[in-house]
Image: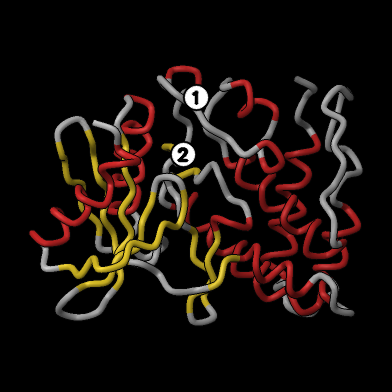
């Protein structure tokens, strides 16, 4: 079955069975749609997967969304099957992506000071994920949603159990600008450093209005990188003593990473 041509009929059938109103399909991305509930007018996201790789990541996202409800926004989620296709259905979180917030804020004076409270929230999100033995693995502006003032991580498709062997996974995924070299190669273990590198990359953009330049061929690729941005954040007045000490420790750990 050609999903692209049969999608409206497939989704209509599904939504009718669930009493959803699918008069209009709003395509959010190449593999997801937003629909309105018929009885309560709530909105839902439907993601589809057919090939083994897509289904692997869909099932992985289902696992982590149900395992970390407080962190992932208390999503209502279920996995449905239609022939060779799987549909992940969850309630739609109405908010603004961090990517949108950055585009609006970075042209303003003192943008670092304005964005510092969101950086604090991101620090807490990563701490909570790691406390639950989860490495998100794909933290980037489009995967962070500001919902009623609360930053919420989405897209847990690439999340892994802390310490699990990345090379043993059947598939791996990454976002190049926010990933360590080992992630891009599918090597090593799922480590806290992977999420903290994403954090410092986002911190650099928030404080400096541009991403850092990393030379992965250097013996210590991250030596001297992110220092100025961390100092700016620590002086913003929003970073607690615990946050400052913890982030300096994480940056020290990143500095020890070898060239890949």
Q: Which mark is residue 166?
A: 1
Query: For the point 35% across and 67% down, which residue is it?
Result: 92
Q: Are marks 2 and 1 in contact (CB under 8 Å)?
A: no
Q: Of helix, strand and loop, which one carries label 1?
A: helix
Residue occupying the point 35% across, 41% down: 4
Q: Quarter-wise, where is residue 207 in the image?
A: bottom right
Rendered residue at 65%/62% (across/down): 99
From the viewer's perspective, tell me whether residue 187 is left or right of residue 164: right
Residue 64 locus on image (x, y percent): 35, 48
- Residue 158, label in figure: 2
Q: Is residue 29 above or below residue 82?
A: below
Q: Position of residue 167 (x, y in %)?
A: 50, 18
Tag 2's secondary structure? loop
Binning the other alpha carbons within 10 Å of mark 1 as few (below 14), some (14 to 19) or many (20 upward) gives many
Q: Nearer the viewer, residue 250 or 225?
A: 225
Mark 2 closeness class: few <14, some 14–19, many ≥20 residues within 10 Å? many
In-image side of 252 versus 48 (left or right): right
Q: Is residue 35 above or below residue 254?
A: below
The Cα–Cα distance between marks 2 and 1, rounded to whole angstroms, is: 11 Å
Q: Residue at x 42, y 42 (%)?
A: 157
């Amino acid at each position: 079955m050609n999903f692209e041509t049969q999608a409206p009929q497939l989704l209509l059938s599904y939504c009718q069975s669930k009493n959803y109103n699918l008069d209009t399909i709003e395509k959010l991305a190449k593999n997801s749609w937003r629909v309105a509930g018929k009885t309560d007018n709530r909105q839902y996201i439907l993601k589809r997967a057919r090939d083994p790789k897509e289904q692997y990541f869909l099932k992985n996202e289902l696992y982590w969304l149900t395992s970390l409800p407080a962190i992932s926004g208390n999503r209502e989620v279920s996995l449905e099957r239609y022939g060779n296709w799987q549909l992940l259905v969850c309630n739609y979180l109405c908010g603004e992506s961090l990517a949108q917030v950055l585009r609006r804020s970075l042209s303003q004076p003192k943008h670092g000071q304005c964005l510092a409270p969101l950086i604090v929230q991101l620090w807490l999100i990563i701490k909570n994920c790691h406390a639950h033995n989860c490495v998100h693995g794909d933290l980037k502006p489009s995967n962070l949603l500001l919902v009623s003032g609360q930053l919420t991580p989405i897209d847990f498709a690439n999340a892994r159990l802390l310490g699990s062997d990345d090379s043993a996974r059947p598939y791996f995924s990454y976002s190049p600008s926010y990933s360590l070299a080992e992630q891009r190669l599918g090597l090593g273990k799922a480590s806290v450093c992977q999420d903290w590198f994403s954090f410092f990359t986002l911190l650099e953009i928030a404080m400096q209005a541009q991403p850092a330049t990393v030379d992965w061929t250097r013996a210590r690729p991250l030596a001297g990188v992110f220092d100025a941005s961390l100092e700016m954040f620590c002086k913003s007045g929003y970073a607690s003593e615990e946050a400052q000490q913890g982030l300096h420790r994480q940056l020290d750990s990143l500095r020890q990473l070898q060239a890949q």
